[in-house]
Image (spheres, rainbow, N blue to C red):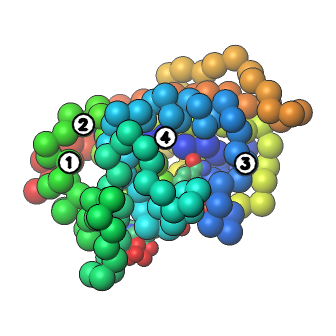
């Protein structure tokens, strides 16, 4: 599986239940990368989506431990074991982890690649992504030229995991 996110200079990813910054070019990249794929997210992230609508043209899987959380438009998983079971029938390259902090943290060891839109600015943040530059098994493999949103620079980065754990071998 892969993860995709936007992060600021301090690896901040969210504040007050929302993204730090909505950047149209980043949203477009996110749509392009995840179209037709399986997206995995935590309940908080699902509830932060515009209009609490599932993402169109994608299989939406939401993690929640709450037994009474239900929604016909989603596949709800109550644990990682249940998630891995559901993912069994999908190509692992077709699965994108889309947040938030708690779900990224739990699923990072199983991710082979992480796509990060890295903002060259420090925002106030209460949710973070692990600092991949400080983790030996993660290497920065690709870096775009600098793009701009208003006066903020940002780049599209791709990190690769040198020692990915196969989720299929964990149960
Ligand atoms: N920058 C980005 O690209 C990006 C992307 C996505 C999200 N975000 C931001 O991240 C923040 C949300 O992150 P968050 O960590 O607070 O919430 P989250 O990870 O989106 O959701 C947390 C919830 O997911 C459920 N959950 C987590 N692990 C589970 C497990 N193993 N089994 C079953 N359920 C599980 C629980 O739901 P229950 O409480 O229902 O049990 C938990 O409370 C927001 O600010 C959002 O905007 C940023």
Q: Quadrant of residue 161?
A: top left
Foreground of the two, 44 or 167 = 44
Residue at coordinates 34% horizontally, 77% vertically from top-left?
A: 69
Task: Find disc 1 in the rendering and name its residue.
Answer: 87
Precedes in sequence: disc 2 or disc 3:
3
Residue 34 x/y as whole percent: 42, 35
Calculate the distance from the C-alpha at mark 2 to the C-alpha at mark 3.
29 Å
For this orientation, the residue located farthest to the right is 151
Q: Secondary structure at mark 2?
A: helix
Foreground of the two, 143 or 20 = 20
Find out whether the residues at labels 2 and 1 contact each other: C-beta distance under 8 Å.
yes
Precedes in sequence: disc 2 or disc 1:
1
Task: Find disc 4 in the rendering and name its residue.
Answer: 4
Q: Secondary structure at mark 4?
A: strand
Task: Find disc 2 in the rendering and name its residue.
Answer: 92
**Quadrant of the snapshot with the C terminus:** bottom left
Please say if 135 is above or below 12: above
Precedes in sequence: disc 1 or disc 4:
4
Find out whether the residues at labels 2 and 4 contact each other: C-beta distance under 8 Å.
no
Left or right: where 36 falls relative to 118: left
Q: Quadrant of residue 104?
A: bottom left
Residue 97 x/y as whole percent: 40, 47
Calculate the distance from the C-alpha at mark 1 to the C-alpha at mark 3.
30 Å
The yes-or-no answer for disc 4 within 8 Å of ligand 1 is yes
Q: Please tell me how crowded label 3 is: few (under 14), some (14-19), or many (20+) other residues with Cα within 10 Å.
A: some
Task: Find disc 3 in the rendering and name its residue.
Answer: 21
Find out whether the residues at labels 4 and 3 contact each other: C-beta distance under 8 Å.
no
Question: Between tags 2 and 3, which lies in front?
Answer: 3
Residue 18 x/y as whole percent: 65, 61
């Amino acid at each position: 599986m892969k993860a995709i996110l936007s992060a600021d200079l301090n690896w901040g990813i969210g504040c007050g239940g929302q993204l730090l910054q909505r950047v149209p070019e980043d949203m477009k990249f996110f749509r392009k990368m995840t179209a037709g794929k399986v997206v995995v997210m935590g309940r908080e992230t699902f509830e932060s989506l515009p209009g609490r609508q599932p993402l169109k043209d994608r299989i939406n899987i939401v993690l929640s431990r709450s037994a009474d959380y239900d929604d016909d438009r989603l596949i709800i998983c109550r644990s990682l074991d249940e998630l891995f079971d559901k993912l069994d029938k999908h190509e692992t390259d077709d699965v994108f982890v889309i947040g938030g902090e708690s779900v990224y943290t739990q699923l990072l060891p199983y991710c082979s690649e992480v796509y990060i839109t890295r903002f060259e600015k420090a925002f106030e943040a209460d949710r973070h992504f692990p600092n991949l530059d400080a983790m030996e098994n993660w290497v920065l493999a690709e870096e775009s030229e600098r793009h701009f949103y208003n006066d903020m620079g940002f780049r599209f980065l791709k990190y690769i995991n040198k020692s990915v754990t196969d989720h299929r071998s964990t149960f």
